[in-house]
Image: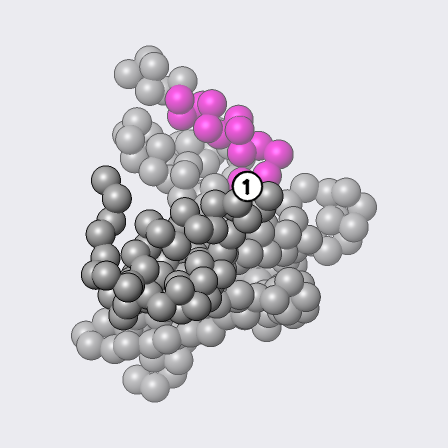
């Protein structure tokens, strides 16, 4: 159905049809359509529709550029060395180690991240990753970490650091390694946060006994599973589902 417009005014359909010869040679942008509409004396309603179309087109272009940049950055990020030891004698990569490993790569690809925090009875930390006019958010919620006799302010600071570290890890699916020399020599590294989540959800689905499962995998916990054994862990759980 042809869009009707008041006499002397240009409709959106007329703008599109007028641009058809040019579109046959290449894709015409909404901004070019808007310019043609203004030249053709289009009414305010038509101009508003074309401006809305331009905004949506720009948003799609920004999302595409963002996704490509994230994929390129992730392909360059190496496993991050676990440089600190927690109260349970388990090693982890602290925020400084993560930032040192990924910040130069993200900056190279036009990406940045920041954190937004809200607090009620719990603490919520949102990692905002942005670039090219597009952004995505990842939020984690937790309680103040009062372990080890921490003061209230230290308990809050510990929880914030933990939530920042893990929300950033999840935003990019970062992996960690125990030994920098091992990685340099082609050694194995542990599974990513996304892979840990996948295994955990599958284990719950098949009602697996996690301590026994970790014993079979010869690891202390899911986060310690080597990347080379990820598929083996998945296969074991899927086998349990079939037998169940």
Residue 4 shows in the view: yes
From the top left corner, tell me how far across and down residue 85 is, in percent.
56, 64
Q: Which residue is mark 1?
A: 24
Residue at 58% in and 51% down: 68
Out of 210 and 97, give the one closest to the viewer. 97
User: Where does the magenta region start and end?
Assistant: 224-238
Is 234 part of what is drawn in magenta?
Answer: yes
From the top left corner, tell me how far across and down residue 145 is, in percent.
33, 72
**Left of 47 or right of it: where is 90?**
right
Out of 40 and 210, give the one closest to the viewer. 40
143 lies above or below 215? below
Give the class, few, some or many, for how many residues have Cα within 10 Å of label 1's Cα (few <14, many ≥20).
few
Is most of the magenta stretch helix, strand or loop? helix
Is 71 part of what is drawn in magenta?
Answer: no
Residue at 39% in and 54% down: 15
Residue at 23% in and 61% down: 7
Dot 1 falls on a residue whose secondary structure is: helix
Quadrant assignment for the C terminus: top left
From the top left corner, tell me how far across and down residue 126 is, in percent.
37, 68
Residue at 25% in and 65% down: 45
From the top left corner, tell me how far across and down residue 95 is, in percent.
54, 70
23 lies above or below 216? below
Residue 163 shows in the view: no
Out of 49 and 242, give the one closest to the viewer. 49
125 lies above or below 18? below
Quadrant assignment for the N terminus: top left
């Amino acid at each position: 159905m042809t869009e009707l417009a008041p006499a002397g005014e240009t409709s959106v359909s007329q703008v599109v049809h007028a641009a058809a010869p040019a579109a046959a040679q290449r894709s015409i942008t909404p901004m070019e359509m808007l310019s043609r509409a203004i030249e053709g004396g289009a009414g305010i309603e038509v101009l508003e529709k074309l401006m809305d179309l331009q905004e949506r087109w720009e948003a799609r272009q920004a999302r595409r550029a963002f996704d490509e940049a994230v994929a390129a950055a992730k392909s360059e990020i190496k496993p991050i060395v676990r440089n600190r030891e927690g109260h349970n004698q388990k090693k982890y990569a602290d925020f400084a180690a993560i930032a040192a490993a990924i910040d130069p790569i993200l900056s190279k690809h036009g990406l940045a991240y920041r954190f937004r925090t809200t607090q009620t009875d719990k603490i919520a930390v949102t990692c905002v990753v942005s670039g090219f006019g597009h952004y995505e958010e990842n939020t984690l919620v937790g309680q103040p970490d009062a372990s080890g006799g921490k003061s209230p302010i230290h308990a809050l600071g510990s929880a914030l650091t933990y939530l920042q570290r893990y929300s950033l890890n999840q935003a990019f699916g970062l992996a960690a390694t125990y030994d920098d020399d091992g990685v340099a020599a082609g050694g194995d590294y542990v599974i990513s946060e996304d892979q840990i989540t996948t295994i955990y959800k599958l284990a719950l689905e098949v009602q697996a006994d996690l301590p026994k499962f970790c014993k079979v995998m010869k690891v202390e916990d899911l986060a310690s599973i080597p990347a080379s054994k990820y598929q083996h862990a998945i296969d074991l759980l899927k086998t349990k589902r079939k037998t169940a």
